[in-house]
Amino acid sequence: MRKLAHRVLLILAACWAATALAAEIVRFPDYPDPNKRFFRAALQLALDKSGQAYTLMPVLPQMLQGRSIARAMGAGGDIDVLWTMTTREREALLLPVRFPVDKGLLGWRIAIVRQDKAAQFANVQTVQDLRYFTAGQEHDWPDTRILRESGLPVMTASQYDSLFRMLVVKRFDYFPRGVAEAWAEVDARPELGLTVDRFIVLRYPAAEYFFVTPRKPYLAEHIWQGLLRAQADGSFDRLFHAHFDPLLQRARLSQRRVIELDNPMIDAGRLLPADSPWWYRPLPAAN
């Protein structure tokens, strides 16, 4: 009996080893992104639901979005999949998985400001009012063009971390961030004297997709199928709400003045319909 049990264990171990060896490595960039735990978990969920054998592996060190896209494009590149805001250019260079992983939250932008200027937007009602203030952004972010084409002044930096110091020394007035990014970034830098504006939210059509290297179209299809299955069985929504609900409660989007901006970098006809349940919509403010 013991010999039989030992043989069964050996067979199971061999099967596990064979499966592990057969699993394809999927490499993704390690962004300086406070929400990367969510996106990595969503990617892992999609791969698990795909029914295929994949193992995720981060590519270090941390890199800018533009660099990761270039490395995903190249024939000998070492990036298989990344997550970023969709644009026409990115959809032409890479294979988009047209599932808004962030439910469009990237298009809801709240501002990091200096504590001594916490009330600077108290009387801002329109985009024209906002033109008296200068925003800060990284030079290769799509947001930079979106803000500028709306007539809003923008100062750029080549390094993400530099933007916080530039705000502190008054190189610009506010740093628009995603609703799921702002507080984590402020909380991580208590010595800088920053806070999150409570009066306004910028909103423009946007979606954060997984983008796959053109070398692996089958991977894009597997991620798409996995996301659809996760959406259908409720596991994707559970993951989304577990990560974002505390941040959305803190953001109080329904109590802010919404300043609508156009997004010239997307083809709106390729986004899901506005009434799709895959988009996030704030609940109306309670009376």
Image (cartoon, rainbow, N blue to C red):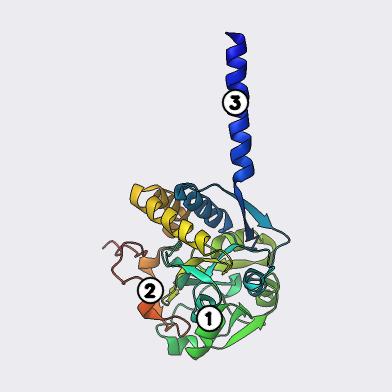
Q: Earlier in the sequence, mark 3 or mark 2?
A: 3
Q: Earlier in the sequence, mark 2 or mark 1?
A: 1
How many neighbours does mark 1 have within 10 angstroms: few (below 14), some (14-19), or many (20 or more)? few
The residue closer to the viewer here, 193 or 9, is: 9
Query: So how many labels did they put on this image?
Result: 3
The residue closer to the viewer here, 140 or 152, is: 140
Element carrying mark 2: loop
Amino acid type at circle 1 is Glu
Q: Is residue 198 left or right of residue 162?
A: left
Residue found at x 59% / y 39%: 19
How many neighbours does mark 2 have within 10 angstroms: few (below 14), some (14-19), or many (20 or more)? some
| Residue 11: mark in rendering | 3
Quadrant holding the N terminus: top right
Element carrying mark 3: helix
Cα gap from disc 2 to disc 1, whole angstroms: 15 Å
Q: Which residue is mark 1?
A: 89
| Residue 271: mark in rendering | 2
Residue found at x 42% / y 82%: 261
The residue closer to the viewer here, 160 or 45, is: 45
Cα gap from disc 3 to disc 2, whole angstroms: 48 Å
Task: Establish if 21 lies above or below 120.
Answer: above
| Residue 62: mark in rendering | none
Quadrant holding the C terminus: bottom left
Q: Is residue 46 left or right of residue 134?
A: left
